[in-house]
């Protein structure tokens, strides 16, 4: 079910392209490539009341190694070979309950339930399932990411921190009576934000009936 927000009740700040080194606060809006295969860019709104750095709107896939896997355990310390860097500048953020753990020693459907960062390349993960190994395993390869079927990973929104703001909107800044606006364009006026719901030509004196200050979050 889609969610409806009243734009005027949230202080919206357009931040441009998503930057993994930036701290985002509630109401921040970013452009983000939501589908690498098609290079599709969407607007996302940060919704969490707590500020975060490196919280990716779309859950990514990360790989790493486990130097030592204890017998029948649900806690693993992993050294990442891509994406993870909690000290800043990271473009991967593990979202507990939404991120799966893939290793031949863990059953299908194992989910990350907690993340404890150690340094810029390591973290200890608590998992929903226990490993099936009967002896200590060294240097096991693991993958962390969204749910997958075969070799194909789902495209999953990080619903803990983000909502899809618009499938194809463009932030236009302050409303202008001489501007041309297309459906989905976003403007601000008198400290309120509005979305164009019908094309507007040159010479429109006010936001009128062709703009709305509420929107429905589309399904991702």
Image: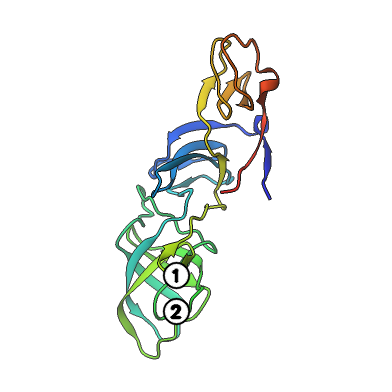
Foreground residue, 189 or 86? Answer: 189
Give me the disc on residue 101: 1
Residue at 68% x, 50% y: name it: 1
**Earlier-in-chain disc, 2 versus 1:** 1
Picture quadrant of residue 78: bottom left
Foreground residue, 99 or 117? Answer: 99
Residue at 43% x, 63% y: name it: 152
Foreground residue, 165 or 131? Answer: 165
Q: CA distance from mark 2 to mark 1?
A: 8 Å
Using residue 85 as the reference point, say whether residue 216 is left or right of it. right
Picture quadrant of residue 122: bottom left
Residue at 57% x, 30% y: name it: 184
Q: Secondary structure at mark 2?
A: loop
Residue 72 is situated, as x and y percent measured from the top left of the image, at: 45, 85
Q: Are marks 2 and 1 in contact (CB under 8 Å)?
A: yes
Dot 2 alpha-carbon crowd within 10 angstroms: few under 14, some 14 to 19, many 20 or more: many
What residue sits right under mark 2 in the picture?
106
Residue 140 is situated, as x and y percent measured from the top left of the image, at: 32, 76
The image shows residue 3, relative to residue 172, as above or below, that is below
């Amino acid at each position: 079910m889609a969610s409806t927000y009243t734009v005027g009740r949230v202080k919206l700040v357009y931040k441009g392209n998503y930057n993994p080194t930036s701290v985002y606060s509630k109401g921040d809006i970013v452009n983000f490539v939501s589908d690498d295969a098609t290079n599709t860019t969407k607007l996302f709104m940060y919704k969490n009341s707590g500020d975060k750095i490196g919280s990716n709107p779309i859950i990514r896939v990360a790989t790493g190694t486990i130097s030592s896997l204890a017998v029948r355990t649900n806690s693993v310390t992993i050294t990442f070979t891509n994406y993870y860097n909690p000290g800043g500048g990271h473009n991967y953020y593990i979202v507990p309950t939404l991120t799966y753990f893939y290793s031949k020693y863990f059953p299908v459907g194992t989910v990350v339930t907690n993340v404890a960062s150690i340094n810029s390349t390591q973290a200890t993960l608590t998992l929903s399932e226990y490993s099936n190994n009967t002896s200590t395993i060294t240097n096991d390869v693991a993958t962390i990411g969204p749910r997958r079927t075969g070799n194909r990973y789902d495209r999953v929104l990080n619903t803990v921190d983000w909502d899809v703001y618009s499938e194809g909107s463009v932030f236009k800044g302050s409303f202008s009576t001489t501007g041309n606006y297309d459906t989905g364009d976003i403007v601000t006026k008198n400290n309120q934000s509005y979305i164009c719901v019908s094309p507007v030509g040159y010479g429109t004196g006010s936001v009128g009936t062709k703009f709305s200050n509420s929107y429905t979050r589309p399904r991702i």
